[in-house]
Image: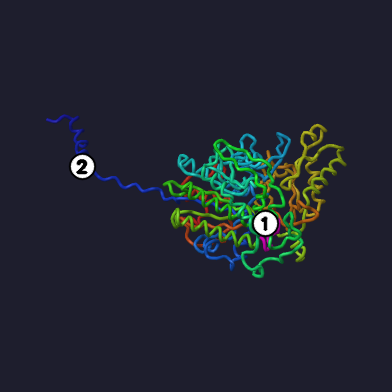
Amino acid sequence: MTTRSSLALLPLLAAFQLPAQAAPPVTAVARPKLVVGIVIDQMRYDFLYRYWEKYPAGGFRRLLGEGFSYSSCHYNYVPTYTGPGHVSIYTGTTPAVHGIVGNNWWLRSENRGTYVTEDRNVQAVGGAAVAGQHSPRNLLATTIGDELRLATNFASKVIGISMKDRGSILPAGHSASAAYWYDGGNGAFISSTFYAPALPDWVQQFNAAGHPARYLAQPWNTLLPIAQYTESSADDVPWEAAFKGETRPVFPHDLPALAASSPAPVAATLKAAGEKPLQPSAQNLDLIRSTPFGNSLTADFALEALKQEQLGQRGVPDMLALSFSCTDYVGHQFGPNSIEVEDTYLRLDRDLARLFAALDAQVGRGQALVFLTADHAAAHAVGFLQAHRLPGGGAGPGLMRDSLQRALVRRHGPGPWLLDYENQQAYLNRPLIAQKGLDLEKIQHEVAADLLLLPGVAQSRTALDLERGHWESGMGMYQENGYYAPRSGDVLAVLAPGWLEAYGYPVVKGTTHGASWAYDTHVPLLFWGWGVKPGESAADITITDIAPTLAQWLRIQEPSGCSGKPLREVLGR
């Protein structure tokens, strides 16, 4: 006779006698082996098509033919500058959240100006102190690279590369494996102790090879016969700035003579532990920034990093944040309609083709995910607009600052009422205003009224108005997206369309950017490679949508301050 307890055990015994079933195979999460972010400094959207007939098959044409293009991608904040632009791409949010309100701003707590990546608590690695004391400490949010590192328990490599410190440091983020930028004093790619105490051997060997000097050993002539540059203005126009040492801004630019005629911008370099120091060059190797060959040098260094760091070849997703800066330097000097800019893009196109071919060979065709965009676009040169009877002009920041200071002195007596004028914003001396027993809001409104009397100013807003107001669009680019109270100014000027900050006022050469108008906000956005099907969308999107889209592809968390939305068309979801 069986007991009740033994009967209860029978189903369990029967279960143990069932035939074993094989566990289903575990498949790896589908992810790209490598994400390559390409930011082209000061690239207008129309540059994709303006030089179309002169682009060979391997660069921009390959991206557009095999990839996905968003034809209506805009920045949704101001000012449209390099620092905020790079950060907004990689954080998926705007200056109001990530805190990078410009390339420079006024530090109220220390009563001085600061630079976006300035960090006096770190030391240079491989270069001069002034060139190397930089880090991402001012950045208040994580980047997509930070999130990739977190998601893989820091096994992924994330590396930033650019001629500009801010173009490499800010995209790479806080936890980057490395960030490298160019020191024109010794012609080297350098870093800081924020990342490592010494440069890797391969970086030292690359620097020792003397690539910048070789690029500057030949004149800059046009890649094609100059008569074929029909998309650009004449070679000699009054609104282009000549190189120091030139009498006219025309081809060929004698780079060997120009580099030899002016000293290197930095007089001394520092030796980090374990490094062979590079001595300052007798040539001005910083000159390469203002030529297309600085982009070629950047591509050379990126290709070496791809090989030496085995990016995308280690069984875990990696990220390369690559920024081409020389388009910005050339654009500032010559303007977007110059032969110099056209030649720079034709040469950059060939550098991109080299990079894409290397990705095919080393990572595998279709195994890397690439996106290409810009940190801002650019206005037409003032002289170009005026020559063609188009509206626009130059507003001198120095003139605006001095005019506001004089108006405040007339009303309230002597004193340094205006501490700074930066990012089209006036920073008032709040301690002095309080000391005099004056009302800050009243003074802000006085300055806003004064700004409206200055040439080129279409609108003005006070900080208190921005803090209290709400706009869905238009002024929302300033208040909702571009304004961060601890770092932004007291009064904001909005320049009229076609007007730009003319730092050489009243002689306005070249161009700049920073406004809310489409010529500064409209940039290309192309995706290519892993998981990308050819296509195009005219949907209205913003630059902050890139990071959450990458997060979807990588199947990781979006950055901490992310406000953008994943782009469904390119994701195919």
Tag count in the figure? 2
Q: Residues within 10 Å of mark 2 (few under 14, many from 20)?
A: few
- Percent of width and height locating residue 276: 57, 40
Q: Earlier in the sequence, mark 2 or mark 1?
A: 2
Q: Which mark is residue 255?
A: 1
Amino acid type of the residue that numbered disc 1 sits on in the rendered structure: Leu
Q: Based on the displayed image, in which of its 4 quarters is residue 155 positioned?
A: top left
- Percent of width and height locating residue 365: 44, 57
- Percent of width and height locating residue 13: 19, 36
Instruction: Nearest to the eye among marks 2 and 1: give it.
Output: 1
Q: Which residue is mark 2?
A: 18
Q: Based on the displayed image, in which of its 4 quarters is residue 137 positioned?
A: top right
Residue 371 in view (yes/no): yes
In the depicted view, which residue is nearer to us: 460 or 507?
507
Residue numbers of the magenta segment: 333-340
Amino acid type of the residue that numbered disc 2 sits on in the rendered structure: Leu
Asked if the residue at tag 1 contacts the one at tag 2, i.e. Cβ–Cβ closer than 8 Å, the answer is: no
In the rendered structure, the answer to whether residue 483 lies left or right of residue 435 reads: left
- Give the image's coloring scheme: rainbow
In the depicted view, which residue is nearer to us: 336 or 150?
336
Q: Residues within 10 Å of mark 1 (few under 14, many from 20)?
A: many
- Percent of width and height locating residue 556: 47, 45
